[in-house]
Image (cartoon, rainbow, N blue to C red):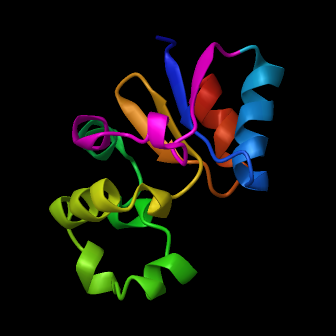
């Protein structure tokens, strides 16, 4: 396994940007296409990301149409345990991209954060 993991959605321009920056910098990384059933993170992987995330843990959950369709609110993802439960049940709600490097993890938004994180 590479030093860097990128939780990536190939249909997302911000996620594609993170992969392109990693390529430009010559970073050795693994792509986790978390939208594919075969690559969806399990509970242990999500716990690891949550333990390392530098952003507010609640930011790991996308507040999109799916979030609303599922009847979720901010109160449903206010704690790390709640975020873990929601993302385990609905991995498509994982914010993208998420970059993990060693004992650190970030959400690659805004795009300007990606290069600094990968070079740090």
The residue closer to the viewer here, 46 or 115, is 46
The residue at the point 53 percent across, 22 percent down is 4
Question: Measured along the vertical axis of the image, is residue 62 above or below residue 10?
Answer: below
Q: Is residue 114 left or right of residue 4?
A: right
Question: Measured along the vertical axis of the image, is residue 113 above or below residue 20?
Answer: below
Location of residue 120 (image quadrant):
top right
Segment colored magenta: 27-46
The residue closer to the viewer here, 39 or 54, is 39
Q: Position of residue 68 (x, y in %)?
A: 46, 87
Q: Is residue 45 left or right of residue 39?
A: left
The residue at the point 59 percent across, 48 percent down is 97
Tell me how many marks there are: 0
Q: Position of residue 40 (x, y in %)?
A: 43, 42
Q: Position of residue 45 (x, y in %)?
A: 30, 35
Q: Is residue 95 left or right of residue 52?
A: right
Name the residue at the left extreme: 81
Q: Position of residue 21 (x, y in %)?
A: 77, 32
Name the residue at the front extreme: 37
The residue at the point 46 percent across, 11 percent down is 1
* 11 in the magenta segment: no
Q: Is residue 63 left or right of residue 9?
A: left
Location of residue 22 (image quadrant):
top right
């Amino acid at each position: 396994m590479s030093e860097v993991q990128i939780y990536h959605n190939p249909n997302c321009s911000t996620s594609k940007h993170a992969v392109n920056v990693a390529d430009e910098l010559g970073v050795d990384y693994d792509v986790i296409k978390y939208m594919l059933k075969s690559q969806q993170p399990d509970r242990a992987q999500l716990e690891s990301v949550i333990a390392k995330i530098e952003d507010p843990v609640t930011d790991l959950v996308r507040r999109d149409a799916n979030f609303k369709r599922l009847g979720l609110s901010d109160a449903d993802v206010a704690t790390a345990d709640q975020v873990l439960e929601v993302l385990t049940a609905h991995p498509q709600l994982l914010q993208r991209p998420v970059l993990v490097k060693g004992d650190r993890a970030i959400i690659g938004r805004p795009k300007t954060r990606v290069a600094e994180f990968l070079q740090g």
